[in-house]
Image (cartoon, rainbow, N blue to C red):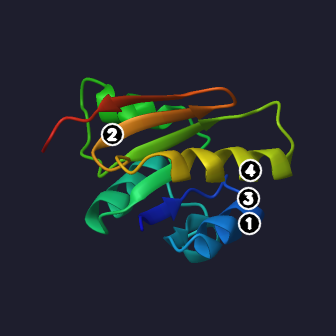
Amino acid sequence: MMRILADENVSYPLVCALRDMGHEVAWVRSDSPGMKDGEVLERAYRERRVLLTFDRHFGDLVFGVAARPAHGVILLRLGDLSRSEIVDAVSAAIKSRSDWEGRFSVIEASRVRTALLKRH
């Protein structure tokens, strides 16, 4: 199973669903609310966790000019779905593959896109 750091914009039902699937999930909202994006990414890397977030800014942090290291990032682009539909979509996507680490992945309603991250 996967070690995940859920950003504070990830809902509690999704955190619970991932834990029920057997993943080890730490949640920024309960552990470190208000943490800045750079600190969240650094924590995920330090703890060897894949970051789960709705925040597109993390793409800039890992691919930009001053790219930061990441263990893996899953960006959720599911804005038009209900909370329960998001839980279902993310659960199904995460079950569908095992190569989340070392990648920047985008989960959308109809597909998953991934790109390899630079090794640091």
Q: Nearer the viewer, residue 1 or 45?
A: 1
Which residue is at a point 53% across and 38% down the rendered structure image?
75
Instruction: Report which residue position mark 4 lands on.
Output: 88
C-alpha gap between disc 1 and disc 2: 24 Å
**Secondary structure beneath disc 4?**
helix
Instruction: Report which residue position mark 3 lands on.
Output: 11
Q: Quadrant of residue 48?
A: bottom left
Q: Quadrant of residue 10?
A: bottom right
Instruction: Report which residue position mark 1 lands on.
Output: 12
Which residue is at a point 29% across and 58% down the rendered structure image?
45
**Secondary structure beneath disc 2?**
strand
CB of mark 1 within 8 Å of CB of mark 3? yes
First in residue order: circle 3 vs circle 2: 3
Image spot of residue 94 (x, y percent): 53, 50
Q: From this view, report whether residue 95 is shown above or below residue 109.
A: below
Q: Is residue 87 left or right of residue 37?
A: right
Instruction: Report which residue position mark 2 lands on.
Output: 103
Identified by mark 2, the residue type is Arg
Q: Quadrant of residue 63?
A: top left
User: Local crowd at mark 3 within 10 Å, few (<14), some, or many (≥20)?
Assistant: some
Identified by mark 1, the residue type is Tyr
CB of mark 2 within 8 Å of CB of mark 4? no
Identified by mark 4, the residue type is Asp
